[in-house]
Amino acid sequence: MPRSPSVIDQARLPRKWPTDLFPAEFWEQLGRTIAAFGLLEEVLGKAIFAFTATTIFDEKDAIEHLAKWDKQLHQALTDTLWPLAEVYGKVMRDHQESDFKNLEGLVEDIKKASKIRNALCHGSWHAPDSSGATDLYYFDKKDGKFDTRIDIEWLRRVHDHVVVLICTVIDSVTVMGWEFPGGAGPGEPIWQK
């Protein structure tokens, strides 16, 4: 039997399709949460700069470090959250003055948060139930399906957690008396223009 061709009548789609089934407050909170993740990536890059710029090397190691520094800083600008967390942990461990409590826990927490960030940014949103919660259609490369029900309150909690991570990363620089790069806060500037 011959098949009948068909196409979507785009003129009949709801005005804000495919996001029309959620209230605007949901999308606002999702956007704010994703924006917080973006700031976390920026802050990690700046912290990597701060630690690598203030680490003391002997002459031989300093020459090797300077030869690789440009590439390292470029990666700090372009890497995603998981590799930034790994590099951040390494440069903190390598710094002679770093005495940050629970560094490994912080790095692991950032890595866990990166999995949530990836799901929020790359998942497909299914219709919410009567309580406003939804399943996110997302599969990662290792752990499989993202299986957390998401609603506005869950997004708020994630956002609040990311804010804590941002502040903790900034504190890891400023607690040593350095001004956080790009800020105008207290501490000694790392780089003079």
Image (cartoon, rainbow, N blue to C red):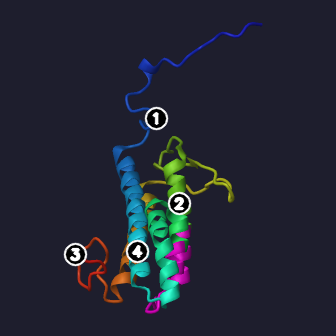
Pinpoint residue 168: horizontal percent, then vertical percent.
40, 78
Question: Residue pushed farthest top?
Answer: 2
Relative vertical location of residue 19 with respect to residue 37 in this rendering, above or below:
above
**Which comes before the other along the chain, label 1 or label 2?**
1
Point 37% across, 82% down: residue = 173
Pinpoint residue 128: horizontal percent, then vertical percent.
49, 44
Disc nearest the viewer among 4 and 1? 4
Disc nearest the viewer among 4 and 2? 4
Is 88 included in the stretch rendered in magenta?
yes
Pinpoint residue 67: horizontal percent, then vertical percent.
49, 73
Amino acid at pointer 1: Pro
Structural distance between the alpha carbons of marks 4 and 2: 25 Å
Residue 134 visible? The answer is: no
Q: Secondary structure at mark 1?
A: loop
Magenta part, dominant SS:
helix
Q: Which residues are magenta?
A: 87-111
Structural distance between the alpha carbons of marks 4 and 1: 41 Å
Relative vertical location of residue 188 with respect to residue 35 in this rendering, above or below:
below
Disc nearest the viewer among 1 and 2? 2
**Which comes before the other along the chain, label 3 or label 4?**
4
Q: Secondary structure at mark 4?
A: helix
Q: Which labelled disc corresponds to residue 116? A: 2
Q: Which labelled disc corresponds to residue 18? A: 1
Q: Are marks 4 and 2 in contact (CB under 8 Å)?
A: no
Q: Are marks 1 and 3 in contact (CB under 8 Å)?
A: no
Disc nearest the viewer among 3 and 4? 4
Point 31% across, 77% down: residue = 180
Structural distance between the alpha carbons of marks 2 and 3: 31 Å
Q: Which residue is mark 4?
A: 49
**Which comes before the other along the chain, label 4 or label 2?**
4
The crowding category of the residue bearing disc 4, from other C-alpha atoms within 10 Å (few below 14, some 14 to 19, many at least 20), is many
Q: Which residue is mark 3?
A: 184
